[in-house]
Amino acid sequence: MSTPIAVSRHLVVSEREWIAARRELLADEKELTRHQERIAAARRELPWVKIEKAYLFETPNGTVSLADLFDGRSQLIVKHNMLNPKHDVCVGCSIEMDHIEGTLAHLPHRDVTFVAISRAPVEQIQAAKRRMGWSATWVSSFHNDFNYDFHASFKLEDIAQGRALYNYNPLSFPIEDLSGFSVFYKDEHGGIYLTYASFGRGQENIITTYVMLDMTPKGRDETASGNMTEWARPKDRYGADGYVDEIGQFIATDDCCRSA
């Protein structure tokens, strides 16, 4: 549990004392940076899994294959977006997509394509894109098992029988979709491989809002670290009356959002 900082009672010192304390913290920060570099290197050394199953996705321009999603590049990052036929955009996926938008002009120059994939029908996806102002490629797996196979979507009977895994552990909470990332590589012969996947708080490092909050005196100011549902909203819902439910959905308590 994180403890909100009582900024009014915080220690105040001279600049000389502050620099000494800051240098001490800097040593720890540099070690964290080096450790993150070691983790990134280990991530690249993970073994791969060859993808043998064929997947077809629906887009506004017709059906495409998993190979097509690479768009001529060798590396593909997939965001498993929780939008599904029953639910609107969730808080967590919404804030992640907001941050990803800023990377889209840069990733292709490093041989990387980004795609979001949801179980929602393509028409629902397009409506969400327009409402949120997102430009990222976002396709529908409504007619295939892609998000199930890569452990971001779950059948309730599998959860009940202990067969559903999320973040590499059994999932007990009855939810049909959760957030995640899967990374793929396509070789010169067209073979496709799963190289990495991340779920839960493993995705926090792309949320630069958290990085910036972590630099401030109050920090994230959450009662439990990573519980953004306490404060975060889809960007068009800030100021609207409502709350976030147990599956990350913003629930309006008035008529502000029901027609959107």
Image (cartoon, rainbow, N blue to C red):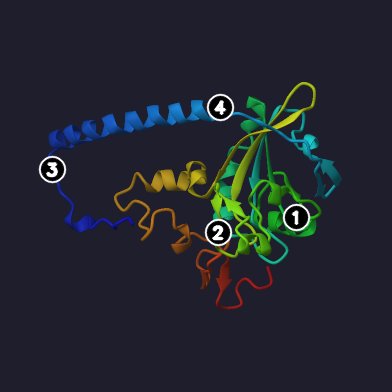
Among numbered discs 1 and 3, the one appearing first in the sequence: 3
Q: Residue furthest bottom?
A: 254
Q: Amino acid at mark 3?
A: Val
Q: Is residue 99 left or right of residue 115?
A: left
Observer able to see residue 234: no
Among numbered discs 4 and 3, the one appearing first in the sequence: 3
Q: Are marks 3 and 2 in contact (CB under 8 Å)?
A: no
- Which circle marks residue 44 in the picture? 4
Q: Is residue 208 left or right of residue 77?
A: left
Q: Nearer the viewer, mark 1 or mark 4?
A: 4
User: Residue 140, percent across and down?
Assistant: 76, 51
Question: What residue sits right under mark 1 in the picture?
Answer: 126
Q: Amino acid at mark 2?
A: Val
Q: Are marks 1 and 4 in contact (CB under 8 Å)?
A: no
Q: Quadrant of the C terminus?
A: bottom right
Q: Nearer the viewer, residue 168 or 69?
A: 168
Q: Nearer the viewer, mark 4 or mark 3?
A: 4
- Which circle marks residue 91 in the picture? 2
Q: CA distance from mark 1 to mark 4?
A: 34 Å
Among numbered discs 1 and 4, the one appearing first in the sequence: 4
Which residue lies at the image location 78% right of the left edge and 36% below the top edge? Answer: 52
Question: What residue sits right under mark 3 in the picture?
Answer: 13
